[in-house]
């Protein structure tokens, strides 16, 4: 599997899966899926009717569906003027993405990868207004960028940021953007999961990439061109910024195909980062200086000799970093699993907040902590519970 960024096009090798950045470099509306050689034709099997249940499910009421239709239609009418299409030119070609109006001062929020290396940039509104835009700040860690446009305030429709912490898995959401250049397209889905992690675009000094946390997973259809567009709740509030999709297949031109797994930067990360980008031009994320496993399987737990599989297992500690100075330990002993070293600390809480997986720790730091802040980690070391005080630095 590969990680594919569509604009501009880079190739990043990952271990388990491919994540395609949902931004488009070019498109062809006459593309159709072709049969795959060596794949057998699916069989249609007729099943024996199942017996009727003893108690019938409540009937679907047409009035309820009409109310949902009216709600979605009204949401689109209210929100779509605040969603924009972004077209870029660069030395390697052109690209297409999405964005949303952040305020009446003309700030547009989108993904960094949408505007990366752009030499010319156009912002198109649903009203038909088309203007040039200027990138004023970038954030490679969460893949955010801020564009400034010179547009009268009465022609701007800023969207409201919602509280992504209040989201529940199963809650309905909609995405609005420009997939394959089809402007102002609306799709519907649910929140599939919260607290996911993705690779940051920024490379760490010791190699590899930093991690981006507090990522929302959704099954709302997101495709090339959706990057930078808003993910909204049914109140019309932005609860995420569509960033990437996980794909196992591609179109004939190599663009990833939606598989029902999309990822969005949470609104509470946007709320924390974007104002600083506007005023200071950059944002510094807190830094611990550790590499940890996202989750621990039962097999890995047994190989590592851990009393539990719940927590963030520290694989490696960066020499001279905050974790190293605080005395945190990474793995050092070979196990029965190649490449997996035992002896590392297992972080089970931060400032009293439980850590089930590494994503919990990362989300907490990104949403609530800054460089210079002090945190208290609760760890398991050799089966014993300890507390370690750590002063955060900024990412180098």
Image: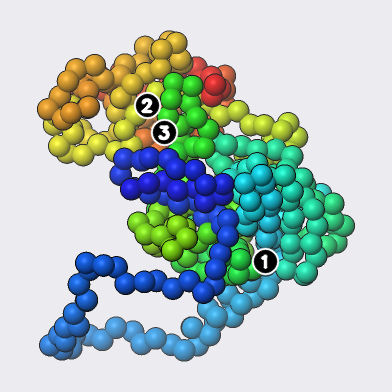
Q: CA distance from mark 2 to mark 3?
A: 12 Å
- The spot of residue 279 in percent (x, y) is 75, 35
Nearer-the-camera pick, 282 or 326:
282
* Residue that lies at the very extreme toward the right in this rendered image: 152
Which residue is pictured at 45% across the width and 35% down the height?
211
The secondary structure type at the circle numbered 2 is strand
Looking at the image, do the residues carrying marks 1 and 2 touch, with CB atoms under 8 Å apart?
Answer: no
The secondary structure type at the circle numbered 1 is helix
Nearer-the-camera pick, 32 or 357:
32
Which residue is pictured at 61% across the width and 66% down the height?
181
Q: CA distance from mark 1 to mark 2?
A: 40 Å
Residue 57 lies in quadrant: bottom left
The secondary structure type at the circle numbered 3 is helix
- Name the colouring of the figure: rainbow
In the picture, the disc for residue 79 is 1
**Where is 190 relative to 15, above or below?**
below
Disc 2 designates what residue? 291
Q: Nearer the viewer, mark 1 or mark 2?
A: 2
In the picture, the disc for residue 361 is 3
Looking at the image, do the residues carrying marks 1 and 3 touch, with CB atoms under 8 Å apart?
Answer: no
- Whether residue 373 is visible here, answered yes or no, is no
Residue 268 lies in quadrant: top right
Residue 144 appears left or right of 355: right
């Amino acid at each position: 599997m590969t990680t594919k960024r569509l604009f501009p096009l880079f190739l990043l090798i990952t271990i388990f899966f491919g994540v395609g950045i949902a931004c488009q470099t070019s498109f062809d509306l006459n593309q159709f899926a072709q049969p795959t050689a060596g794949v057998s034709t699916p069989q249609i099997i007729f099943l024996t009717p199942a017996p009727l249940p003893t108690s019938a499910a409540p009937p679907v009421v047409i009035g309820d569906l009409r109310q949902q239709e009216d709600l979605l239609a009204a949401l689109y009418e209210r929100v779509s003027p605040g969603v924009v299409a972004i077209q870029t030119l660069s030395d390697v070609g052109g690209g297409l993405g999405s964005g949303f109006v952040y305020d009446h001062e003309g700030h547009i929020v989108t993904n960094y990868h949408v505007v990366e290396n752009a030499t010319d940039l156009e912002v198109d509104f649903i009203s038909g207004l088309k203007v040039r835009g200027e990138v004023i700040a970038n954030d490679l860690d969460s893949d955010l960028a801020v564009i400034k446009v010179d547009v009268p305030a009465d022609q701007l429709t800023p969207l409201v940021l919602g509280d992504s912490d209040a989201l529940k898995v199963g809650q309905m959401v909609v995405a609005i953007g420009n997939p394959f250049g089809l402007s102002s397209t609306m799709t519907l889905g649910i929140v599939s999961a919260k607290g996911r992690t993705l690779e940051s675009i920024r490379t760490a000094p010791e190699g590899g990439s930093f991690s981006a946390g507090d990522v929302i997973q959704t099954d709302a259809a997101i495709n090339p061109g959706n990057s930078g567009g808003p993910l909204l709740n049914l109140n019309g509030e932005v609860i995420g910024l569509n960033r990437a999709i996980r794909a196992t297949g591609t179109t004939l031109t190599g663009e990833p195909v939606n598989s029902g797994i999309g990822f969005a930067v949470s609104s509470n990360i946007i709320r924390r980062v974007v104002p600083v980008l506007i005023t200071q031009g950059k944002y510094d994320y807190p830094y611990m200086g550790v590499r940890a496993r996202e989750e621990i399987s039962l097999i890995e737990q047994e190989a590592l000799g851990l009393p539990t599989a719940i927590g963030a297992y520290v694989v490696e500690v960066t020499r001279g970093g905050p974790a190293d100075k605080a005395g945190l330990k990474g793995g050092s002993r070979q196990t029965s699993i190649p490449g997996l070293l035992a002896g590392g600390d297992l972080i089970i809480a931060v400032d009293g907040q439980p850590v089930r997986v590494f994503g919990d720790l990362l989300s907490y730091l990104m949403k609530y902590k800054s460089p210079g802040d002090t945190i208290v980690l609760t760890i398991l070391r050799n089966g014993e519970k300890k507390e370690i005080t750590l002063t955060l630095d900024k990412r180098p």
